[in-house]
Every structure is written in C-alpha cells, then in structure tokens.
Image (cartoon, helix red, strand yellow):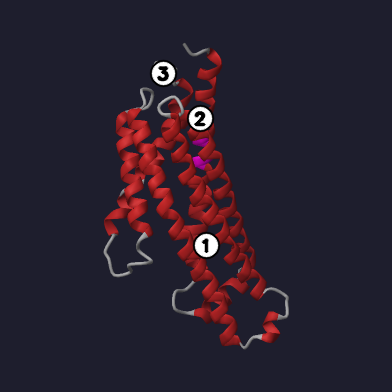
Amino acid sequence: MTDQTNKTSLRSAALISGLAILTMAIAAPFAELYVYPKLVIAGNAAETVKNIMANETLFRAAIFAYLITFIADVVASWALYVLFKPVNEHLSLLTSWFRLVYTVIAIVALLDLLTVLRLLGPSDYLKVFEPDHLYAQVMLSLNAFKKSFHFGIVFFGIHLGLLGFLIFRSKYIPKTIGVLVIISGLGYFITSLKPFFPDINIDFAKYTFYGELIFMFWLLIRGSKIQEPNY
C-alpha cells in the first residue's frame, strides 16, 4: 500500500513535467521556427552571414532559447521517470534515458552555433579568412548543428513512443493521450529522417505533433488530481 508521500510525488512530478514541456513549447519555436529561418538563408552564405552580423543579439537569444529548451528536457526526463515509475520502473528509466541521449546530442550540437559567433565576432578570423572561406565555415557550422540536432530527434521520437506506451498502460492518464503521444513520436522520428533523405515527402508528419501538446495541457490542468495507482 502506497502512502500520501508517494501520491504527492506523482502529482508534483506531473506539474513539474508539464511546466518543463510548457517551457520548451515557448522557447523552442522562438529559436527553431522564428529566429533560425529568419536569419539563415539556405544556399546563400553571404546573406546568412549578413543577417547574423546585423542581428547578433537575436542570434544569441536563439542560442539561449535552445539552451533553455535542453535544460527543460533534462527536468522533464527526470519528472516523467518519477511519474511513470509506478507503471514500469525499468521501462520508465529507459524512456527517460532516450530523452537524455537526445538532449546530450542537442547540447553538443549547440556548440556549432557558438562557433558561428566566434567566427563572426571581434576576432582574428575576419582577418585570416577570405570572405568566401569565412562564409563557407559559417554555413558548415550551421549545417552541422542542424544535422546533429535532427539526428538527436531520432532518440526523442523513440522516447515519445515509449512514453505513449507508458501513458496507455497507466491507470491515471487517459489512454487516448497515450495513443496521441505515440503518433507524435512517429512524427518526430519520420521528420528526423528528412535531412538524410531530402527527396521523401513527409508533409503529413506536421499534423502528428499535437499529442505532446495535449499531454502537456493535461499535466498542467489535471495532473494535480492524479489518484495513486493500485498496481
């Protein structure tokens, strides 16, 4: 028989994970969907460098937003482990590890964006490299970030698939949400393959990501009312 301490822990874990996912839902789109497409012009290195140098503060804000997102991922990984430990402790741990692997890959990839700042900052790089060479180095760093980040998304998609299964097996979160989160995981996994297979059509995948948001809202609104499971 579980005690009140465990029940409080589950409710706290639900709230913490909901807040962490909410933080990601705010920070990640700012960096990934607003700043990055605004500054980085595919196939045009000179224009990209010009944009970044003219909007350095915005570019730094994007890096910071990415960092906040990845820190929130670490928090969410721990909180979700606690939340689904009663369902299956070992599977919950594995699920969290997949998210942590994605986060480590993403943080390492973030160093490529810092390299862009070093290349374009007040340093000797501007004197040593010819403009075309410098532009090429910047684009290489930007492309390396994207490729590494998308590779990490493979692990994030697997994480969501396992998470959805845990939700489906739990007795305190609606099974429908588990199915939606599994679909979200498949969407992320398929999207992560796009940079490696640029000719495939995955437009349908953009409609699969709502499960994670629905799960977030459930955690924030209903998570405080979770009843202690009786496994």
Q: Secondary structure at mark 2?
A: helix
Foreground pick, 174 / 220: 174
The relative height of residue 116 versus residue 219 in the rendered view (above or below) is: below
Question: Which residue appears at 51% of the width and 40% of the height?
Answer: 77
- Label 3 vs label 2: CA separation? 13 Å
Q: CA distance from mark 1 to mark 2?
A: 34 Å
Q: Is residue 181 left or right of residue 84?
A: left
Label 3 vs 2, first from the N-terminus: 2
Q: Earlier in the sequence, mark 1 or mark 2?
A: 1
**Residue 153 image position (x, y, % from top left):** 43, 54
Q: Sort mark 2 into few (<14), some (14-19) or many (20+) by Cα contacts within 10 Å.
A: many
The reply to whether discs 3 and 1 touch (Cβ–Cβ < 8 Å) is no
In the rendered image, which residue does mark 2 sit on?
Answer: 82
In the rendered image of this protein, does residue 161 appear above or below residue 172? below
Q: Which residue is mark 3?
A: 229
Q: Which three-letter amino acid code belongs to the residue tagged 1?
A: Val
Name the kind of residue labelled 2 in the image: Val
Indicate left or right for 142 with 230 as reference.
right
Residue 172 is one of the magenta-drawn residues = no
- Which comes sooner in the sequence, label 3 or label 1? 1
Residue pointed to by mark 1: 35
